[in-house]
Image (tube, rainbow, N blue to C red):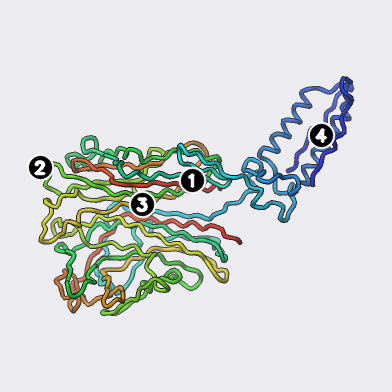
């Protein structure tokens, strides 16, 4: 609804400062977020040139727009991201405690509720650990706000074809390239974190290269 | 254009009257009811300016996960018939009401499916020198319903049709494309009587809509396999093979009388429809 000032009244002609301040506050609040559809001309007054340009933050590689927020990270050629077997899947535990793959996270703040798309890819290398005779797995999944999302998981086996029967499986059998996504609908306004977490039943797993990205669309 | 009179409420140093102040605020109220382009400087609108009722989503999105955490068998597979991945809560997106795609709109579909295992425990990738087209796997692909049932996306290879074996599905880079298809190799690690690929494959399809409006009601993810990538003499195809005859006479562990059992696990699908110039 349009801006509606309070009529200043009083028994005298002296204007109360609180009344003036109240009306000014109303005006500020109106301009800063409560302009309603009916207050605006109904046709074609808003063109793309009227939209605020986005703001790019090179430190976090985030680009904020009127309608959303984008961010991403791609590993450099010399970078690797390690997860060990010790705190995760050593011994072939049934439910592996997951830890974060370093430098795969994005922290962001939504100005309003949004639909947010997360994507990742990663190429894992996972040497074996002596004495493990089964087919050790290593895994990865998206964690949003510190909660791992099972539906986003990818797996591969330890990259050691000594463990494989070469007569039936080639060495290429062991390595799956990882790629996945998650779409969070109506994610609340405020601060959030997104990252890759996983567990390793081999000696360790490192990512040779990886990328993560997020794109938010305000509702 | 909304304007406010610039008349002062009183000379400096004098006591102002409530009447003048009220008039001033009334001017403001009147002006804010007639805002138009003249009130807005270039690059002057941002999200804070507009109430939630004014903004509208620039995209339609939907997402679902089938919630499957244990592998689910799909027995009897010869690759001749595609099937919908109905495991768990399924991999279907439903738009109600339908989303009208206009020329210039971009539809982005993402999906992942986990190929857990299959029952050809001795499977290996057989490279035959006389026939390099020996890559065998299962495929996952999106279909959409724009009013005539589920069909493959525009210009995609005809992988949603049932074929008798042997048959070939033409593929190319024009109107029989495979870029919406996610290929999962059958290669994996032998474990007991099964082969474990444990491979999550990520498929994506981007459709820039052209032509007349269409009403999109559903998207779903289908599977078919085993299927062979076939390239001979420069032509390419996906073969619905007779697995006992050339060029697939190599000893695969599956054929018409002993079909493949495909075990799938978690799956998810999302769609983002971005407004173009409409």
User: Residue B193: x and y, percent?
Assistant: 14, 60
User: Residue B4: x and y, percent?
Assistant: 82, 39
- For marks 2 and 1, give the one nearer the viewer: 1
The numbered mark, 2 or 1, whose residue comes first in the sequence reads 1
Q: What label does residue A180 carry, if any?
A: 3
Subunit of label 3 = A
**Residue occupying the point 26% across, 65% down:** B137
On screen, B178 above or below A100? below
User: Residue A132: x and y, percent?
Assistant: 12, 44
CA gap between label 2 and label 4 equals: 82 Å
- Residue corresponding to mark 1: A70
Density class for disc 2 (Cα within 10 Å; few <14, some 14-19, many ≥20) is few
Density class for disc 3 (Cα within 10 Å; few <14, some 14-19, many ≥20) is many
- Residue corresponding to mark 4: B25
Tell me if residue A43 can be seen: yes
Which residue occupies the foreground of this view, B271 or B76? Answer: B271
CA gap between label 3 and label 2 equals: 32 Å
- Residue corresponding to mark 2: A131
- Residue B222, by quadrant, is bottom left
Density class for disc 1 (Cα within 10 Å; few <14, some 14-19, many ≥20) is some
Subunit of label 4 = B
């Amino acid at each position: 609804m349009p801006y509606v000032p309070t009529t200043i009244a009083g028994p005298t002609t002296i204007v109360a400062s609180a009344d003036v301040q109240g009306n000014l506050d109303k005006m500020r609040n109106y301009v800063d977020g409560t302009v309603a559809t009916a207050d605006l001309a109904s046709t074609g007054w808003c063109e793309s040139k009227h939209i605020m340009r986005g703001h790019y933050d090179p430190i976090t590689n985030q680009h904020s727009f009127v309608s959303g927020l984008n961010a991403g990270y791609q590993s450099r050629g010399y970078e690797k991201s390690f997860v060990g077997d010790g705190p995760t899947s050593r011994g072939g535990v049934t439910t592996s405690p997951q830890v974060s793959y370093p430098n795969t996270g994005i922290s962001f703040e939504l100005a309003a509720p949004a639909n947010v798309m997360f994507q990742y890819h990663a190429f894992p290398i996972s040497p074996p650990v002596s004495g493990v005779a089964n087919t050790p797995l290593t895994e990865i999944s998206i964690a949003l706000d510190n909660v791992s999302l099972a539906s986003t998981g990818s797996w591969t086996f330890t990259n050691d074809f000594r463990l494989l029967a070469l007569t039936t499986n080639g060495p290429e059998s062991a390595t799956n390239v990882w790629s996945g996504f998650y779409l969070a609908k109506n994610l609340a306004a405020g601060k959030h974190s997104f990252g890759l977490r996983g567990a390793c039943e081999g000696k360790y797993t490192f990512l040779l290269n990886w990328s993560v990205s997020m794109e938010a669309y305000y509702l | 254009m909304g304007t406010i009179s610039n008349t002062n409420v009183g000379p400096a140093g004098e006591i102002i009257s409530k009447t003048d102040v009220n008039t001033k605020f009334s001017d403001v109220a009147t002006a804010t009811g007639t805002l138009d382009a003249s009130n807005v400087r270039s690059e002057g609108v941002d999200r804070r300016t507009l109430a939630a009722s004014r903004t509208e989503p620039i995209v339609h999105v939907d997402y679902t996960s089938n919630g499957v955490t244990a592998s689910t068998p799909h027995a009897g597979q010869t690759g001749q018939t595609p099937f919908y991945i109905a495991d768990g809560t399924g991999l279907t997106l439903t738009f109600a009401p339908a989303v009208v795609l206009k020329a210039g709109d971009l539809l982005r579909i993402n999906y992942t499916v986990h190929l857990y295992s299959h029952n050809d425990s001795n499977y290996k990738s057989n490279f035959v020198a006389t026939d390099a087209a020996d890559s065998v796997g299962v495929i996952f692909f999106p279909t959409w319903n724009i009013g005539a049932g589920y069909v493959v996306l525009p210009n995609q290879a005809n992988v949603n049709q049932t074929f008798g074996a042997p048959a070939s599905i033409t593929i190319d880079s024009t109107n029989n494309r495979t870029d919406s298809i996610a290929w999962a190799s059958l290669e994996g690690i032998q474990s007991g009587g099964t082969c474990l690929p444990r491979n999550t494959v990520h498929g994506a399809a981007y459709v820039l809509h052209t032509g007349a409006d269409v009403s999109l009601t559903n998207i779903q993810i289908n599977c078919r396999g085993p299927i062979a990538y076939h390239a001979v003499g420069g032509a390419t195809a996906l073969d619905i093979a007779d697995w006992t005859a050339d060029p697939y006479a190599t000893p695969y562990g599956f054929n018409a009388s002993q079909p493949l059992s495909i075990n799938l696990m978690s799956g998810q699908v999302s769609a983002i429809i971005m407004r173009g110039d409409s």
